Image (cartoon, rainbow, N blue to C red):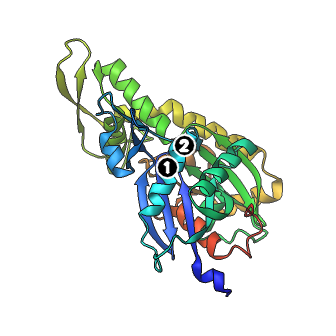
Amino acid sequence: MGLFDFFTQEIAIDLGTANTLIIHNDKVVVDEPSIVAMERGSGKYIAIGQLAQQMHGKTHEDIKTIRPLKDGVIADFQAAEAMIRGMIKMIKFKNSFFTPSMRMVICIPSGITEVEKRAVRDSAEHAGAKEVYLIHEPMAAAIGIGIDVEEPMGNMIIDIGGGTSEIAVIALGGIVCDKNIRIAGDEFTQDIEEYMRRQHNILIGERTAELIKIEVGAALPDLEHPPEDYAVRGRDLLTGIPKEIHVSYKEIAHCLDKSISKIEEAIMSALENTPPELSADIYRTGIYLAGGGSMLRGLDRRISLKTKLPVHVAEDPLRAVARGTGIALKNIGKFQFLMGG
């Protein structure tokens, strides 16, 4: 260990469309929504994460809330930089008499372009990183689940996040075939908003739609342990007066059907492109689900019925990618698939 290693802090970042997690010393030290609030006049960022989330959909003209990531990639460069910088400030570093130099491992979607990679790297460097390593999300999810990715054994990982669903077959420390579609948690939320407007003549915001998804979201219209109906409050489109209605999980399963079918198509397409030896492995090991979207009730059963394969949901699927990124950070030398700084 060199003298400068004492001054270097290592952090792993799961930069997600919906949530950003930061791991430092094997612990999740930051888990915040990926959103910032900006004052329009001065251009100053006044809130980050949870605080900004509370303002979302409730701001006046002087404040604007921004989600810097769209479909898993950086859409607003300055806001992303402010968000990363603000979240790093939330970490309590030891020896914090001076700003530490930082080594970062950041996970990125597998279908990302070179330009989008550059944007992630630049944002991290502007936020204070001296070394930046990038890791693909399905690979990080596989490591987080506890799969030995360097074995000559095929494993299929499906990571359903906020902006993207990533389907990858992993063997020998690399991604053999992958499919990346921009249909995931955010799309489910939009489907619910649309359905409420069309079916119930009620206008709801993004945060309410998100709550409906969490409380009564389902992928199948018949569940063994159904959730109770959920009370939804919004604006009546006919009268303009606020009103309340109750929705059941069956309705939500119906309105999410189209988007889930697209994810199923992508899974089938990835399976079709898998080399036969790896297909034989997947038949034995099954499919692993990670990411917040995999917590949708009945989704594992629906994918299992479609593919005729066993489907396993990772424990704590929301943090599987972040955990894997943290493990990769500790073993930078060992993992060759990290794209170096």
Residue at the image point whose x is 60% and y is 51% from the top: 123
Tell me the residue that label 2 is attached to.
78
Query: What is the total number of numbered labels drawn onto the structure image?
Result: 2
Residue at the image point whose x is 45% and y is 33% from the top: 256
Q: Tag 2, which secondary structure?
A: helix
Q: Residue furthest top?
A: 238
Residue type, numbered disc 2:
Gln
- Left or right of 242: which side holds 216? right
- Left or right of 318: which side holds 8? right
Quadrant of the drawing holding the N terminus: bottom right
For the residue pair 84 and 44, the one nearer the viewer reads as: 44
Q: Position of residue 193 (x, y in %)?
A: 38, 28
Query: Is residue 134 positioned above or below 80 on the image?
Result: below
Q: Position of residue 314 (x, y in %)?
A: 51, 62
- Left or right of 55: which side holds 341? right
Task: Say which mark, if any, is on residue 82.
Answer: 1
Q: Quadrant of residue 126?
A: bottom right
Quadrant of the drawing holding the C terminus: bottom right
Q: Dots 2 and 1: beta carbons under 8 Å? A: yes
Residue type, numbered disc 1:
Ala
From where the camera sits, is residue 236 visible?
yes
- Left or right of 249: which side holds 121? right
